[in-house]
Image: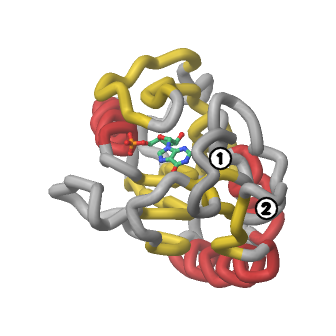
Amino acid sequence: MDKFELLISPDKIASRIKEIASELDEKFQNEVPIFIGILNGSFMFMADLLRQISVDCEMDFIKLSSYHGSASSGTVRLLKDISADITGRHVVIVEDIVDSGLTIRFIKERMAEADPASLTLVSLLLKPELAKLDFPIDIVGFEISPEFVVGYGLDYDQKFRNFDGIYRLKEGSADF
Ligand code: IMP
């Protein structure tokens, strides 16, 4: 743990999640939205966010692979599709981090094919300096600088997802 530096504390994450949940409750007060978490990274955010949502809602997961080690491979593969029929539904995509924007673009285009009533994109983190997007992310938890972070669901080679906050690697710590 001494190789890592806390970037966003569990308390800060929890209070931002409450704000995001209120915004979504307000937006969907007369609807039953379906939340779709992008595995594996969003599992913790999804669990904490849904515990703060008050409107009736459903949930599902989609699993993609777009990232290897600390550099984006530039391609997105679908490893597990959603089971729910989202045609005519209000869909909320729950992502851990938007880095290059490749993954969220893939999801957005794939979901749009099913003709949902609405599509809301939520990401806990956004690296605005890197993301090349020609569409908005509707709700962003925190904007961060373009550095590699782990914890709160985010991994490096599948490790460190269990950390309860968001951490960056300390200067001079070349290896995890
Ligand atoms: P994008 O397709 O380049 O936007 O990358 C999105 C995916 O890459 C996320 O869902 C993460 O799984 C992973 N990713 C991007 N940046 C980081 C990071 O700083 N730490 C851990 N995973 C990351």
Where 67 falls versus 59 (above or below)?
A: above
Label 2 vs label 1: CA separation? 15 Å
Point 57% across, 52% down: residue? 96
Q: Which residue bears the numbered disc 1?
A: 154
The reply to whether residue 54 is in sight is: yes
Disc 1 is placed on an element classified as: loop
Q: Identify the residue at horizontal 76%, vertical 51% (top origin).
A: 44
In the image, residue 120 sits, relative to residue 61, either above or below, namely below
Mark carried by residue 71: none
Provide residue 125's location: percent of width, then percent of height: 51, 63
Q: Amino acid at mark 1?
A: Leu
Q: Report whether the residue tagged 1 is closer than 8 Å to ligand 1.
A: yes
* Residue appearing at x 54%, y 16% in the figure: 79
Q: Along the horizontal axis of the image, is 156 left or right of 133? A: right
Answer above or below: position of 173 versus 123: above
Amino acid on which disc 2 is placed? Asp
Helix, strand, or loop for circle 2?
Answer: helix
Q: Nearer the viewer, mark 2 or mark 1?
A: 1
Q: Which residue is mark 2?
A: 48
